[in-house]
């Protein structure tokens, strides 16, 4: 299962979470080590002249020069198998619930627990081949070959596949359908290699796949400003930058709760403990709208809060993306929510400073862009080694100091992502949530997912562009209004500001506390925006015919349109159509009235 060979060395120097040890010259880069009497988990990050530089993933307070270091001659790895879903881990895959039972609220140095339950028995069901026959001894295999399935939760069917590291080409033995633990051998190859229900994988190595595919389908989040204005595809990358209090974490919570991914991996990287507490208490109580069961049955949580050792924060993103790739290889669509990559970058900066490396912009290491690229490039939609299609979508929060988007983490992140949801401080302070600004935000996936929307509603692209243009025109008019006041504008321009307000309040603003409004299906989203834009176009035409703006603003249908989002459930599309009918009737009445006045 894992290399048991060891090499011993000695601590020669200590600099916070960075240690230096001699006697480890035969070890490899990124090998795992146990440090000191408490056997703290660490990783070799540099080798030079027989001296190993080690970053320790636990609190090393009290560590002394001369203590023993044991290298296991294997890279830092996570264990992949049934039992991952619904578990809460720290950055190095220690199950926090198990550790809480053994050590209480505070982790003791060197505290360990197995990542997966070694004693639990899972029902392994043999898979059928394409010919409909069960997998049997003597069959040819390759990496990714499906051997069987395990019902991990009610929502997740876990596929047991041949690991990418197995070199055998045929089976000599395979277990029958039955109950097995993750340590039981379920198959053997002609090279006498055992295959288990679980295996290890190095977190810094991307899992292999057969082919990378173009993205073609949106990741539906239920948030109108995202799905319609700035869509993210399945297999895409997005960033949510914003200053303190603008709603980064709450936006990610909403995406995690409602997006149509098969599995959610939520990484709390360096965030405050109370925010992770909200996640840990809310998620088990939330009901998955697709299965009507607990959302935790398709969620993995990685909690690495700001009071945990900084080195573990650096590796938590790699642990999360490795877990996501494992389920992607089963043919699932996985969404990763990383909150936040700025805290991860700060961990890189602190470790780099401890190693006395030359700093770059704002003290961050020169390899910050490389590390960001390595993380985001592991997203994508792929054909797995077994032939299935899966995807990993990454949404990373960025916390620029003072909300300054010109700082290095935000700027480098923009180089590697294609969807940018810029949070606006003024919108957040005005209690407009999600506070995603429509001026700085963008999505490069709109054209690639357009065929999907065209099949659902061909009006999507046109009405989206019209609404974005309307909001930009309203912003320019606001600058004039600040100087001369709104009354100085003609009605043909004031209707722009009225319609833009309808878009902002009736469409973009969305309440996470309203049971009807917290999630909006694509059909309802596009119907609301189409009605608002039709009102604007018809109202402007009627104003050109001589009708005063006040007549149109006071129409009963205007308030009714702005209440569609909360007044009609997702299934009541007929009720929304009835609002559109009443709007046209009221606008027709005013139009006829002023056409008669014009003719007379």
Image (spheres, rainbow, N blue to C red):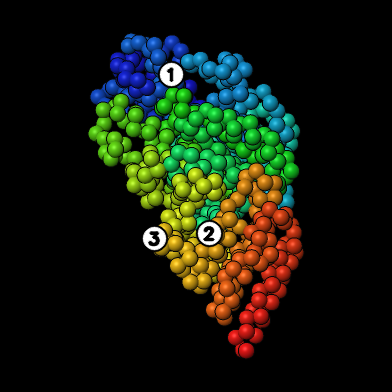
Placement of the N terminus among the 4 image quadrants:
top right
- The residue wearing badge 1 is 59
Examine the rendered structure and indicate whether residue 350 appears above or below residue 385. above
| Dot 1 alpha-carbon crowd within 10 angstroms: few under 14, some 14 to 19, many 20 or more | many
Examine the rendered structure and indicate whether residue 312 appears above or below residue 532. above
Horizontal side of 409 relative to 491 (left or right) equals left
Quadrant of residue 537 within the rendered picture: bottom right
Residue 256 rendering spot, x and y as whole percentages = 59, 43
| Dot 2 alpha-carbon crowd within 10 angstroms: few under 14, some 14 to 19, many 20 or more | many
Residue 372 rendering spot, x and y as whole percentages = 39, 43
Between label 3 and label 2, give the one nearer the viewer.
3
Circle 2: element type: helix
- What numbered label is drawn on residue 229? 2
Examine the rendered structure and indicate whether residue 19 appears above or below residue 548. above
Distance from Cα at disc 1 to Cα at disc 3: 58 Å
Distance from Cα at disc 2 to Cα at disc 1: 45 Å
Tell me which numbered mark, 2 or 1, is placed earlier along the sequence.
1
- The residue wearing badge 3 is 483
Distance from Cα at disc 3 to Cα at disc 2: 30 Å
Circle 1: element type: loop
Quadrant of residue 522 within the rendered picture: bottom right
Residue 570 rendering spot, x and y as whole percentages = 71, 55
Tell me which numbered mark, 1 or 3, is placed earlier along the sequence.
1
Horizontal side of 357 relative to 206 (left or right) equals left
Residue 276 rendering spot, x and y as whole percentages = 55, 31
Residues tagged 2 and 1 counted as in contact (Cβ below 8 A): no
Residues tagged 3 and 2 counted as in contact (Cβ below 8 A): no
Residue 472 visible to an observer of this rendering: no
Circle 3: element type: helix
Q: Could you tell me which residue is drawn at 51 percent across and 15 percent down?
A: 108
């Amino acid at each position: 299962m894992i290399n048991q060979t060891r090499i011993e060395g000695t601590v020669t120097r200590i600099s916070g979470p960075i240690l230096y040890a001699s006697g480890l010259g035969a070890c490899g880069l990124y090998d795992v080590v146990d440090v000191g009497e408490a056997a703290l988990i660490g990783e070799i990050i540099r080798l030079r002249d027989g001296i190993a530089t080690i970053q320790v993933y636990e609190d090393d307070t009290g560590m002394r020069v001369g203590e023993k270091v044991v290298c296991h001659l294997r890279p830092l790895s996570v264990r992949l198998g049934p039992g991952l879903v619904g578990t809460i881990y720290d950055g190095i895959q220690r199950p926090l619930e198990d550790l809480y039972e053994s050590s209480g609220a505070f982790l003791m140095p060197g505290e360990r627990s197995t990542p997966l339950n070694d004693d639990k028995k899972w029902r392994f069901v043999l898979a059928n081949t394409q010919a409909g026959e069960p997998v049997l001894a003597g069959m040819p295999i390759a990496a990714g070959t499906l051997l069987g399935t395990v019902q991990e939760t009610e929502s997740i069917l876990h596929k047991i596949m041949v690991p990418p590291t197995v070199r055998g080409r045929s089976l000599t033995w395979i277990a029958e359908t039955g109950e097995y633990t993750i340590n039981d051998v379920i198959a053997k190859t002609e090279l006498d290699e055992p295959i288990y229900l679980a295996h290890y994988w190095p977190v810094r190595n991307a899992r292999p796949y057969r082919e990378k595919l173009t993205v073609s389908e949106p990741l539906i989040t239920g948030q109108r400003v995202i799905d319609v204005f700035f869509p993210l595809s399945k297999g895409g990358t997005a960033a949510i930058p914003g200053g303190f209090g603008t709603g980064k974490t709450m936006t990610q919570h909403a995406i995690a709760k409602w997006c149509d991914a098969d599995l959610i991996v939520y990484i709390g990287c360096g965030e405050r403990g109370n925010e992770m507490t909200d996640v840990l208490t809310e998620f088990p109580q939330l009901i998955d709208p697709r299965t009507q069961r607990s959302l935790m049955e398709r969620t993995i949580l990685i909690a690495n809060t700001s009071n945990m050792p900084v080195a573990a924060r650096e590796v938590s993103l790699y642990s999360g993306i490795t877990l996501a790739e494992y389920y992607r290889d089963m043919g699932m669509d996985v969404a990763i929510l990383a909150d936040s990559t700025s805290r991860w970058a700060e961990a890189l900066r602190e470790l780099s400073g401890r190693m006395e490396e030359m700093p770059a912009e704002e003290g961050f290491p020169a390899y910050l862009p490389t590390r960001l690229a390595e993380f985001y490039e592991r997203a994508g939609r792929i054909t797995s080694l077994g032939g299935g299609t899966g995807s990993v979508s990454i949404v990373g929060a960025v916390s620029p100091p003072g909300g300054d988007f010109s700082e290095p983490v935000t700027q480098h992140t923009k180089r590697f992502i294609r969807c940018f949801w810029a949070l606006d401080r003024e919108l957040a302070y005005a209690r407009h949530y999600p506070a995603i600004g429509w001026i700085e935000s963008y999505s490069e996936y709109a054209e690639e997912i357009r065929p999907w929307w065209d099949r659902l509603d061909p009006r999507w692209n046109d009405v989206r562009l019209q609404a974005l243009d309307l909001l930009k025109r309203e912003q320019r008019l606001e600058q004039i209004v600040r100087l001369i006041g709104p009354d100085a504008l003609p009605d043909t321009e004031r209707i722009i500001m009225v319609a833009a307000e309808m878009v902002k309040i009736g469409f973009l603003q969305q309440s996470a506390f309203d049971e009807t409004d917290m999630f909006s299906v694509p059909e309802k989203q596009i119907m609301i925006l189409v009605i608002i834009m039709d009102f604007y176009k018809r109202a402007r035409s009627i104003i050109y015919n001589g009708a005063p703006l006040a007549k149109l603003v006071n129409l009963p249908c205007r308030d009714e349109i702005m209440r569609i989002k909360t007044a009609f459930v997702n299934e009541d599309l007929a009720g929304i159509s009835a609002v559109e009918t009443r709007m046209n009737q009221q606008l027709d009445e005013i139009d006829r009235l002023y056409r008669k006045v014009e003719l007379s």
